[in-house]
Image (cartoon, rainbow, N blue to C red):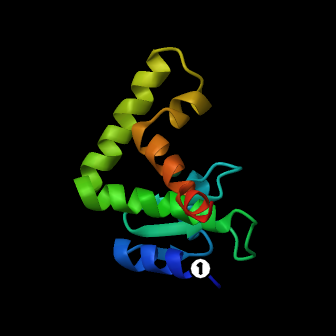
Amino acid sequence: MNLSDELQQAVAESGARLHFRFPAWLRPFVFRGITAITIGRRVYVRTADAPDGLERLLRHEIEHVRQINRIGLIRFYARYGVEYVRHRRAGMTSWDAYRAISFEREARAAEEVQGDLDV
Ligand SMILES: [Zn+2]
């Protein structure tokens, strides 16, 4: 897997461990359409054949690893769940509720970093 220097550095600094397939035990829990999931420092990416957005996807997931490093695993998933439920109770669709989670907003912003630097 050829990753840019910038991304390799981000992986090293965050302590993220990349896996280019989902483990068997995780598959029943992974919804169709999900291409990556981060559990602690482990980042699982669905496929080894690089999608065009792989670097973008990895920047997103590595941001989640940084968030977990910052506040701890338990608090990360607790807040993630609380925010999701709060958004659903406020009437948002499942997709919108997920997108509005503060950690997801932050991770989406992190996707853009490289592009901004290139301009
Ligand atoms: Zn995310």
Give the residue at x 45% y 23%.
87
Q: In the visual, does 67 lie left or right of 49?
A: left
**Could you say which quadrant of the image residue 14 lies in?**
bottom left
- Residue 80: image x %, image y %? 38, 40
Give the residue at x 65% y 52%.
34
Residue 72 visible? The answer is: no
- Say what secondary structure mark 1 lies in: loop
How many labels were placed on the picture?
1
From this view, report whether residue 100 is shown above or below residue 19. Answer: above
- Residue 85: image x %, image y %? 42, 27
Nearest the eye: 37 or 31: 37
Assign the N terminus to one quadrant of the image: bottom right
Structural crowding at the residue carrying mark 1, measured as other residues with C-alpha within 10 Å and reported as few (<14), some (14–19) or many (≥20) = few
- Residue 117: image x %, image y %? 55, 62
Assign the C terminus to one quadrant of the image: bottom right
**Could you say which quadrant of the image residue 10 lies in?**
bottom left
Residue 12 visible? The answer is: yes
Residue at the farthest front position = 119
Give the residue at x 62% y 68%.
55
CB of mark 1 near ligand 1 (< 8 Å): no
Give the residue at x 52% y 29%.
97
Nearest the eye: 73 or 22: 73
Instruction: Name which residue type carries label 1.
Output: Ser
Q: In the visual, does 33 lie left or right of 100?
A: right
From this view, report whether residue 74 is shown above or below residue 82. Answer: below
**Could you say which quadrant of the image residue 99 lies in?**
top right
- Residue 111: image x %, image y %? 56, 55
Q: Which residue is mark 1?
A: 4
